[in-house]
Amino acid sequence: MSTSLGIDGVVVVFFFLITLGIGLFSSRIGQKKKYDELTLGGRRMPWWAILGSIIAAETSAGAFLGTPAEGYVLKDFTYLQLALGTVIARIIIGFLFIKPFFQSGVHSIYQFLETRFGPFTQKMASATFLLSRMLATGTRLYVAAIILVVGAEFFLHKPLSRPQEISLYFISIFLISLFTASYTALGGIKAVIWTDLIQALIMLFGAAFALFFIFAKLSSVYSYPEIVHLFFHRPWFTTGITPSKGLLGNLLDILAIDYTLWSALIGSTFTTMATHGTDQDIVQRLLTAKNYQKSRLSLILSGLADIPIGFLFLSIGLLLSFYYSVYTDPALPTKPNEVFPYFIISQLPSGIRGMVVAAIFATATGSLSAALNALATSFCQDWLTPSFERLVDEKKKVSKLRGATLLFALLTSTIGVATALYTVYFPSARILPIILGIIGFSYGPLLGVFLLGLLTRHRGTDRGNVLAMIVGFCVVLLLSKIPNSTSYFHEKNNSLFSLEWLPHVAYPWRIFIGSVATFSIGILFRNKTAFSQKAKPS
C-alpha cells in the first residue's frame, strides 16, 4: 500500500512542479514585468491557447466532480441539455460583446460601463463581480479538497470525525491557494493561460481513462450490447410539460424544474451570456487575443467543446450508478459529491489514480489562478483609480497587482473553508446547484446592465442603473423563495408574508429573471448623451 501511495504521490508532485515551472517561465519570457503583460499578456496570446484556457476554466473541480454527481443522482443525460444554450450564448457574445470591449481598450470590462454610464454603474458592477467570483471560487476550492478527505477515510478504514474532516479541508484548501497564488502573481495572465492549457489536457485524459476503466469493469457483468442499451436508453431531453395542467400550470412547472429544454434554450443561454460576457474571469482571457476575430473564434469553439466534455462527465456518473448497483460497497459515501472521488481512490490502479487526482487539482488550480488574476485586475482598475491610472512606475503597478492577488487568495480560501463547513453539516448538498446558485443571484443584474449598455444608446443612467440592479437582485431573491426559509416568514405560513403565492424559480432561470428585471427598470431612465462604442475609457 505504501509503495502504491508513493507512486501516486510522485505523479501529483510532478504535476505541481510542472505547473509551477510554467508559471515561473511565464514570469520571465517575453516581458519585463509590465502591468499590461500581467493583465492582458500583451494581446499576443494564440487563439488555441485561449480556447484551452476557457475549457479549463469551465471544467473546474466543481464540474469534474459535480457533473458526475448529477449523472449519478439523475441517472440520465438531461443536464446536457444546458449545453445548447451555452453554444447559442457564445455566438451572441462573439458578435455583440467582444468587439466593443476591444475597441474600448479596457483592462477591466467594468471600465466599459464607466465610459457608457458613469462611475456608480462601474463600481456596482465591479463589486457584484468581486463578491460573486470570490464566493464561486471559494466553493470550487472546497471541491478540490474532497478527494483528500475521501482518500483519508479510505486508507484509514473509518470515517473522519467532524473536527478531523474540517481540519483536513482547512489545510488542503490553504495549501492549494498558496501554491496557485504564487505562480499567478509571478506570471500573470500568461501563466494562467499556459498552465490552463496543460491542465485541460491532463483533466480530459484523466476523465477519459476513468470512463474507460468503469466501462471495462462493467463488461465482466454485462455484455457490450447490454451496457450500450443501459447507457443510451436514458432521457436526454425533457420539456417539463404536462398536457392536463394547462398553460399557467405548465409555465410554473417549467420555471421550477432544473433541467428542461426551455431552461436549456433560454435559461442556459442567459446564464452563459453572463458568465462569459460580463465576468472579468473569462473575458480577460478573451482580451489577450491579437484581435476580436481571434477572440470570437476561441469563444465559439469552446462552446462546441462543451457538448462532448459534458457528455464525458455525465457518462462517468451514469456508469457509476450502474457499477455500484452491481458491486455493492458498504463503505460507499452517501454524499453524491464523494462517489466519484471514492471510486478514484478505491478502484483505480496506482499511478493512474495519481494522474486522475492530479487532474482534479489541475482543474482547481486552473480555475483559481484565472479568478485570482481577474479579481486583482478588476480591483486595481475599478477601485484604485484614478491614483492607479496615474502611476507611471511599472514596478509599483505590478506590486499592487500582485498584492491584490495574494489578498484574494486569502479571501477565497476562507470562503472555501466556510463551504466545507456547510457541506459537513449538510451532507446532502449538491455541488453544481451551490456554485451556479451563487452566481444566479448576482449575475442577472450584471448581464442586464451590460445589455442595456450594448443594445441602447440613450437609455440607462448612472444612478438609475444602480436602482435597476438592486431590483433585479431582489426579484431573483424573492422568486428563489430564500426569505421564505427564515423562521419569521415560516411562522407567517398562511399570510401574504409567506411568499407561497409567488412562483418558484429553479437555479438555471435565475440569471434570465434577474437580467430581464434589471433591463426593464434601467430602460425607463433616459440618458441625453448618446454613446459611441469607439469611445476610449477615461
Image: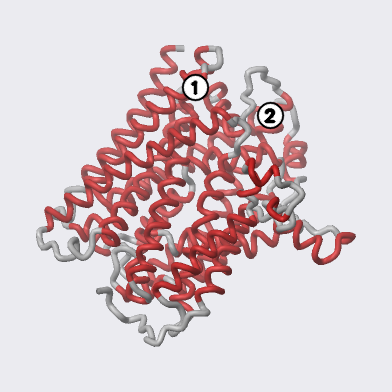
For image coordinates 51% across by 20% down, the residue present is 162
How far across and how far down the image is residue 160, in percent? 52, 17
Residue density around tag 1, few if under 14, some if 14–19, many if 20 or more, within 10 Å:
some
Q: Quadrant of residue 30?
A: bottom left
- Residue bearing mark 1: 151
Say which label, 1 or 2, has the lower sequence index: 1
How far across and how far down the image is residue 357, in percent? 45, 31
Residue 381 or residue 367, whichever sits in front: 381
Residue 534 placement, left or right of 2: left
Vertical position of residue 437 compared to residue 148: above or below = below
The answer to whether any part of residue 162 appears in the image is yes
Q: Amino acid at mark 2?
A: Tyr
Vertical position of residue 98 compared to residue 17: above or below = below
For image coordinates 28% across by 43% down, the residue present is 407
Picture quarter with the C terminus: bottom left
Vertical position of residue 208 compared to residue 350: above or below = below
Question: Which structural element holds mark 2?
Answer: helix
For image coordinates 57% across by 68% down, the residue present is 517
How far across and how far down the image is residue 445, in percent? 50, 64
Residue 293 or residue 537, whichever sits in front: 537
Q: Quadrant of residue 177?
A: top left
Q: Amino acid at mark 1?
A: Gly
- Residue bearing mark 2: 323
How far across and how far down the image is residue 11, in percent? 38, 28
How far is the residue under mark 1 from the one under mark 2? 20 Å
